[in-house]
Image (cartoon, rainbow, N blue to C red):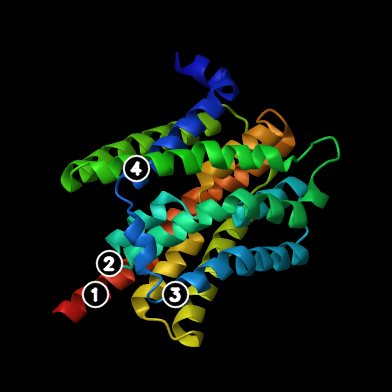
């Protein structure tokens, strides 16, 4: 049965990816309130900075890094897909566990998710189109459709339903739905690796090292820049660092499968970068989360 799953994984990939994404966004929506967006308006500088980081800063950092390195086109496209994605629900969870500014994290994730409907296709078209083989079309309509169906609709429905539910019921419903999304995420990763669609040997150790360095570089620039140049609080700086480095990789996997497929070498290379980044970001983003949680504990003591 397991062998059959791996053998036919490409037939199930989009179903698993879309299910995971819908569950994650719906679960986040249950505990997201409109006031989370309103609260940050009182002090708008951090969210404005966060938007500029993700819309301009990260794409430019990525473009600079790709210009300096001689990488296969599918790897370059994978990096730009990471740069084009909004933050994911995991950034909100990490911010909460790290005693960060949850309202800022949720608001930034929500606003970037809305903007991604337009900005993600634009970033990919500006930076990645020249690296995509001419026989592969990159229609913006596909990206817009995926973002609308699997991000905006479940998030909006979750927020609507959550506003009618008691707070404790909404909280526990969200916890279990997000746990179910993590099971789907594990299935997604195991299926992608077990199916053999990703050829680790053809890329060697260089790409994993580059992915780790890229994720760490983005986080350091944003975290340090926020703290020392923009003079934000340690809590807000930590939140922006986490939010900018933890992208919605599940959305990028879904879009990559729609655009490039999983059976081609090009699609496998893009998928390789996305899966690596998703795993690496879990560890890299834990550093500011743990540091801020410890600092908060000392401050309380």
Hey, which quadrant is residue 142 in on the image?
top right
Identify the mark nearer the N-term, 1 or 2.
2
> Could you tell me which secondary element the residue under label 4 belongs to?
helix
Q: Whole-percent x and y of residue 272? A: 61, 43
Front: mark 3 or 2? 3
Identify the mark nearer the N-term, 2 or 4.
2
Vertical order, 287 against 86 (above or below): below
Q: Whole-percent x and y of residue 170? A: 23, 43
Whether the residues at callouts 1 and 2 have beta carbons within 8 Å, the answer is yes
Identify the mark nearer the N-term, 3 or 2.
3
Identity of the residue drawn at 52% across and 66% down: 216
Identify the mark nearer the N-term, 3 or 1.
3
> Could you tell me which secondary element the residue under label 2 belongs to?
loop
Q: Nearer the viewer, residue 287 or 293?
A: 293
Q: Which residue is mark 2?
A: 99
> Could you tell me which secondary element the residue under label 1 belongs to?
helix
Q: Which residue is mark 3?
A: 44
Q: Whole-percent x and y of residue 41? A: 41, 71
> Could you tell me which secondary element the residue under label 3 belongs to?
loop
Q: Is residue 21 visible?
A: yes
Few, some or many C-alpha atoms within 10 Å of disc 3 (few <14, some 14-19, many ≥20)? few
Few, some or many C-alpha atoms within 10 Å of disc 4 (few <14, some 14-19, many ≥20)? some
Q: Which residue is mark 4?
A: 160
Identify the mark nearer the N-term, 1 or 4.
4
Instruction: For marks 3 and 1, give the CA distance.
Output: 23 Å
Identity of the residue drawn at 76% across and 67% down: 68
Identify the mark nearer the N-term, 4 or 3.
3
Q: Which residue is mark 1?
A: 296
Q: Is residue 71 visible?
A: no
Identity of the residue drawn at 56% across and 69% down: 53
Instruction: For marks 2 and 4, give the CA distance.
Output: 26 Å
Whether the residues at callouts 3 and 2 have beta carbons within 8 Å, the answer is no
């Amino acid at each position: 049965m397991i062998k059959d799953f791996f053998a036919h994984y490409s037939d199930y990939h989009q179903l698993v990816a879309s299910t995971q994404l819908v569950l994650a966004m719906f679960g986040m929506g249950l505990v997201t309130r409109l006031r989370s967006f309103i609260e940050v308006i009182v002090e708008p500088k951090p969210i404005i900075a966060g938007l500029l980081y993700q819309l301009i800063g990260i794409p430019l950092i990525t473009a600079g890094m790709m210009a300096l390195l001689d990488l296969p086109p599918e790897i370059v496209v994978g990096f730009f897909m990471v740069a084009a994605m909004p933050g994911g629900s995991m950034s909100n969870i990490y911010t909460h566990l790290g005693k960060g500014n949850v309202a800022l994290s949720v608001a930034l994730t929500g606003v970037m998710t809305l903007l991604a409907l337009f900005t993600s296709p634009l970033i990919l078209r500006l930076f990645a189109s020249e690296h995509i083989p001419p026989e592969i079309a990159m229609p913006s309509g596909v990206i817009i459709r995926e973002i609308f169906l699997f991000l905006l609709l479940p998030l909006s429905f979750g927020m609507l339903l959550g506003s009618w539910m008691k707070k404790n019921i909404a909280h526990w419903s969200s916890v279990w739905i997000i746990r179910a999304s993590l099971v789907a995420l594990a299935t997604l990763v195991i299926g992608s690796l077990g199916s053999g669609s990703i050829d680790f040997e053809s890329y060697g150790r260089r790409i994993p090292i580059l992915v780790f360095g890229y994720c760490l570089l983005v986080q350091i620039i944003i975290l340090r820049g926020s703290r020392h140049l923009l003079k934000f609080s340690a809590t807000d700086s930590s939140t922006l660092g986490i939010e900018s480095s933890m992208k919605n990789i599940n959305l990028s996997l879904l879009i990559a499968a729609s655009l490039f497929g999983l059976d081609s070498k090009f699609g496998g290379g893009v998928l390789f970068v996305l899966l690596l980044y998703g795993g690496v970001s879990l560890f890299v983003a834990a550093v500011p989360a743990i540091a801020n949680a410890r600092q908060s504990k000392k401050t309380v003591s």
